[in-house]
Amino acid sequence: MCFGSKDNSSAPAPKPAQIPQQQPTNSSYPSKAMGNSSYDAPPPGPPPSHHAGPSTDYAPPPGPPPSKGRNGDFAPPPGPPPARRVNEDYAPPSGPPPARNANDDYAPPPGPPPSHDYAPPPGPPPTQEPKKHAWEEAVPDTSLLPPPPDYFGSFDRSPTNNATEQEAEAGESWCRQYQLYPPIQPDQQVLDALKVGNINLFTPPFFKGALAQIGLGVWKGHSYSGSPDTCIASYPPLYSVAAHSPLATGRKKIIYYEVNILSDSRREVSLALGFNAPPYHSFRLPGWHRGSLAVHGDDGHKFTNDRWGGKSFTGAFKRGETLGIGIDLSPGHGGGISIEVFFTRDGREVGRWNLHEERDQERDLTVEGLEGFHDLCAAIGVFDKVNFEIVFAPGKWKWKGYQG
C-alpha cells in the first residue's frame, strides 16, 4: 500500500477490509444465526495464504512486489520526485520549479509587479515649496576662532594712575552713609542763571591749588604737583528734574560744558570731566562711585560707577586741547528717559555712549542717580599738577551743537 506524504506514523499498516460473500445454499457447514452461533462459515474457496513475515496477517496484493530502497523503505513512485519547500509539507504545483531568488525561496511571479495599494489622487501633483537657502552650510563654524575683543569690558586697573584700595573702600562707605538728594525746586533766578552759564564752583578745604571766576560762566584754576584726588562740584545743578525732565516737558534737554587744558600743564593731563548726582564725596574723582560718570584724561577711559580701570573710549588728553562733555536726555520708549553721553575734542564730537545699552549686566554696577530722576551737577576731577579753564557760557564753547 502506498501512504500519503502526510502519514508519518511508524505503526504497522492496517489490515485490508474483508468483503463479505454470499453463502451458497448447499454448503456442508451449518448456518449460523446472527448473534447466536459461535462460528461463522468461512468464505468459499481456499483460505488466503499468510505473509511470511511475523507481523502481517495477509499476503501482499497481487502483482510484483514494489522494489525496496537500500534501507528497506519503499521506492518512490515513478517519475521525478516532487519539489518540496523547506518549511512546508506539501509539494508546489506541477510544472518546473520556479527560479530561486538569492534572498527568498522563490523568484517573483512572472509579469509586472503588482501596483501599490492605492494610486495617487487624480489631478496634477502638488507644487513643491521652493528650496530654502542652507545658510548653516554657508556660514563658517566660528567655534574654533578666538573670542572677539571685549569692547565693553572693564579694565581691572588703569595703565597710568590708580588710587589705593583703602581710598576706594572709603568712597563706598561714604556713599552708604549719605543717600542721594531728592530733586530741588529751582526759582526763576536760578533758571535764568542756567541759561547764560552763570554757574558757581566749589572746592573742598583740602584742595591744593587755586580756582577763581574770570568772567561770566568762565573759571580758571590750577593744582600743585602732588595734589591728592579732588572733585570740584558745580551749583546749581545743570540738569533740574523739576525744570528739565523730558517726562514733564516732552522735549529733550542737553547739558554740556567745556574745559581748556592750558599749555603750562604737565604732559600727562591729570584731569577728569563728568557729572554727579549730589551729594558726591570731594576726595574721589568723578565716575568712580554711585551716581557719577566721567572721562579721565590720563588714559582716555570712561567711567560710570566704576572704581576699577574704566572702559576704553578715547585717547589721553593733550595740553592745549579743549575737551567737552554732555548728556542728551530725551523721551524714551515705554515712558522712560533715553540717556546718551557724548564727548567733544576742540569742538568736534568724537564719541558717545548710551547709558543703558553699553553695559555688562554681570560686571557693571548700577546707574542709579544718572537716569534723569535726580538733579545732575558738573564734576571736574583733578590731581597732581594741571592748569585749566572751565567754560559754562554757551556763547564761548567751541562746540556749536547746543540747542538749549
Image (tube, rainbow, N blue to C red):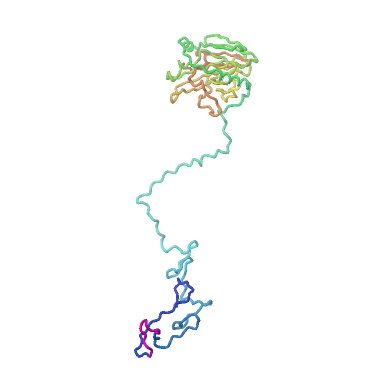
Q: Is residue 161 visible?
A: no
What secondary structure is the stretch in magenta mostly built from?
Answer: loop
Q: Residue furthest front?
A: 36
Number of numbered discs present? 0
In percent of width and height, residue 146 lies at 58, 35
Question: What span is in magenta?
Answer: 28-39
Assess whether residue 156 is covered by the magenta stretch.
Answer: no
Left/right placement of residue 356 relative to residue 230 reads: left
Q: Is residue 103 above or below residue 34?
A: above
Q: Is residue 252 visible?
A: yes
Left/right placement of residue 165 relative to residue 111 reads: right
In percent of width and height, residue 93 lies at 42, 69
Assess whether residue 37 is covered by the magenta stretch.
Answer: yes
Q: Residue furthest right?
A: 226
Q: Quadrant of residue 382?
A: top right
Quadrant of the drawing holding the N terminus: bottom left
In percent of width and height, residue 336 lies at 45, 23
Say which residue appears at 42% left-offset and 79% top-offset: 16
Q: As rendered, which of 233 and 123 lies closer to the eye?
A: 233
Q: Quadrant of residue 219?
A: top right
Q: As rendered, which of 271 and 287 lies closer to the eye?
A: 287
Q: Quadrant of residue 144?
A: top right
Q: As rendered, which of 387 and 61 lies closer to the eye?
A: 61
In percent of width and height, residue 240 lies at 48, 16
